Amino acid sequence: MEYNHAAEMNGVVSDYLNMCIESKHNDLCKEKDTKEAADSKKLSLIEKSYGTILSELGEDVDREGLRRTPLRAAKAMQFLTKGYKETTKDILNDAIFDENHDEMVIVKDIELYSLCEHHLVPFFGKAHIAYLPNKKVVGLSKLARIVEIYSRRLQVQERLTKQIASAISEALEPAGVAVVIEAVYFHTTSFIMLVCEVERNTGGVERSSDTEVMHETLMKK
């Protein structure tokens, strides 16, 4: 009798768990469907806008070579600005480790590709990151992901440099962090190098410094 009762209870518990799992699955599916519908609508609107631009430029959007160009351009723009949908928290949660390491960590030549927000033309180059750990380190590949998150947005190089440095500083709370970006723009022949350093002083206040201060401070460390 007790055996039958236990078996019956197990069956009830199993049915309940299955129901919960199915309900959770359905909720996730609904959320995914809603997101996909919203993304599809946005894509359609961007595609229509590109069609309008081409028409206003005097092109025939129905000719063979341009028939699918608005859609391709819309998909390309979504890819080039996908950083708006990503956060550093999403990628760093499981990649920050407690480590008694006080030597400088340097990652060089991280490739970056972005769009200038003034003309919507590409700029590309390399980012170099250095930080002094304060009992926390992060997987090196995650630094490249941080660069990608902020570069895959409409940007100016000054803000991009600062955002990368600030994101690392907030996530790791290091003794110091420095970011150097070298980039080339398609609409200018100039070569630009920008440096951003964020260092926590004893009062916990962040400050930005130029290249000379960065070298001086990090060498002292």
Image (cartoon, rainbow, N blue to C red):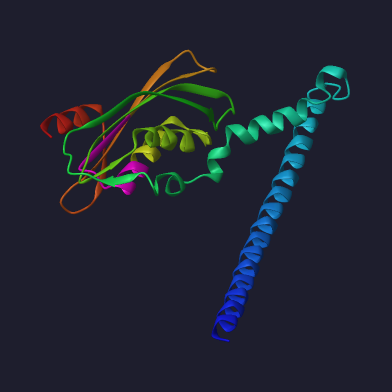
* Residue positioned most to the bottom: 1
Q: Nearer the viewer, residue 51 or 134?
A: 134
* Residue positioned most to the top: 189
Q: Position of residue 50 (x, y in %)?
A: 75, 31
Magenta region includes residue 172: yes
Magenta region includes residue 16: no
Residue plotted at (51% across, 23% down): 123
Count of marks, rendered view: 0
Residue plotted at (61% across, 64% down): 21
The quadrant of the rendering that contains the N terminus is bottom right
Name the side, left or right, on which 37 lies relative to 16. Answer: right
Q: Position of residue 100 (x, y in %)?
A: 17, 44
As displayed, is residue 5 above or below residue 166? Answer: below
Q: Position of residue 7 (x, y in %)?
A: 59, 77
Residue plotted at (70% across, 33% down): 74
* Residue 53 visible at all: no
Name the side, left or right, on which 106 lies relative to 47. Answer: left
Name the side, left or right, on which 80 lies relative to 165. Answer: right
Q: Nearer the viewer, residue 34 or 152?
A: 34
Q: Nearer the viewer, residue 4 or 143?
A: 4
- What segment carries the magenta color? 166-179
Residue plotted at (60% across, 70% down): 14
* Residue 214 visible at all: yes
The quadrant of the rendering that contains the C terminus is top left
As displayed, is residue 185 above or below residue 12? Answer: above
